[in-house]
């Protein structure tokens, strides 16, 4: 009898896992609003943001390949590495970017924190602080539970 209950329990788990996989699970992210940029402790007002994609299921899909143009500064997000997710804490990690000022282009890392729908990334370029901030809208996907 115990074996039968275990088989039924695991079967139910596999069926539900397959069903969630069909519907996507997780959430849909999209960058919303303006992108704020600062360089050398000054905010730059005239910013042009070109997203990689209007929406996606993770930061990789919406941010990797995105370009931020602000006066004499250009930031292209080339990769990212999330830190291990801690339940109840903001999501953190590192963006790897190509940052260009005038004729100099360097690959730098920028630590990020994602909290309450706002992602803020900060780093250092030639001993000067550099950063950007934007809103990220996230919506739960439809998941059917049987």
Image (tube, rainbow, N blue to C red):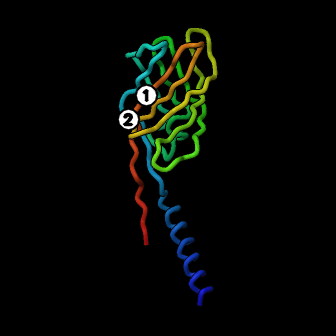
Name the residue rendered at 57%, 40% in the picture: 82
110 with respect to 143 (left or right): right
Tell me the quarter of the picture where residue 115 sits. top left
Residue 121 is situated, as x and y percent measured from the top left of the image, at 50, 28
138 with respect to 125 (left or right): left
Front one among 121 and 53? 121
Q: Residues within 10 Å of mark 2 (few under 14, many from 20)?
A: some
Disc 2 to disc 1: CB gap under 8 Å: no
Name the residue rendered at 60%, 27% in the picture: 109
Front one among 61 and 26? 26
Name the residue rendered at 49%, 23% in the picture: 131
Circle 1 — which element?
A: strand
Residue 38 is situated, as x and y percent measured from the top left of the image, at 45, 18
Q: Which residue is mark 2?
A: 32
Residue 89 is situated, as x and y percent measured from the top left of the image, at 47, 44
Q: Quadrant of the C terminus?
A: bottom left
Q: Nearer the viewer, mark 2 or mark 1?
A: 1
User: Is residue 66 positioned above or below 91 on the image?
Assistant: above
- In space, the residues marked 2 and 1 are separated at their CA atoms by 11 Å
Residue 5 is situated, as x and y percent measured from the top left of the image, at 56, 84
User: Is residue 110 positioned above or below 104 on the image?
Assistant: below
User: Is residue 145 positioned above or below 123 on the image?
Assistant: below
Q: Which residue occupies the extreme top position in the image?
A: 102
Q: Which residue is mark 1?
A: 133
- Tell how many labels: 2
Circle 2 — which element?
A: strand
Q: Earlier in the sequence, mark 2 or mark 1?
A: 2
Q: Quadrant of the N terminus?
A: bottom right
Name the residue rendered at 51%, 25% in the picture: 122
22 with respect to 1 (left or right): left
Q: Residues within 10 Å of mark 1 (few under 14, many from 20)?
A: some
């Amino acid at each position: 009898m115990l074996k039968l209950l275990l088989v039924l329990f695991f079967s139910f788990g596999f069926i539900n896992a397959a069903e969630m996989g069909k519907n996507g699970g997780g959430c849909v992210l999209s960058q919303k609003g303006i992108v704020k940029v600062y360089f050398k402790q000054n905010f730059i007002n005239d910013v042009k943001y070109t997203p990689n994609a209007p929406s996606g299921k993770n930061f990789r899909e919406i941010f990797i390949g995105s370009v931020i143009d602000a006066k004499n500064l250009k930031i292209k997000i080339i990769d990212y590495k999330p830190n291990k997710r801690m339940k109840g804490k903001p999501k953190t990690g590192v963006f790897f970017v190509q940052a260009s000022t005038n004729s100099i282009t360097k690959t730098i890392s920028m630590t990020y924190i994602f909290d309450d729908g706002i992602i803020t990334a900060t780093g250092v370029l030639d001993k000067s602080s550099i950063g950007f901030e934007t809103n990220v809208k996230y919506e739960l996907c439809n998941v059917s539970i049987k």
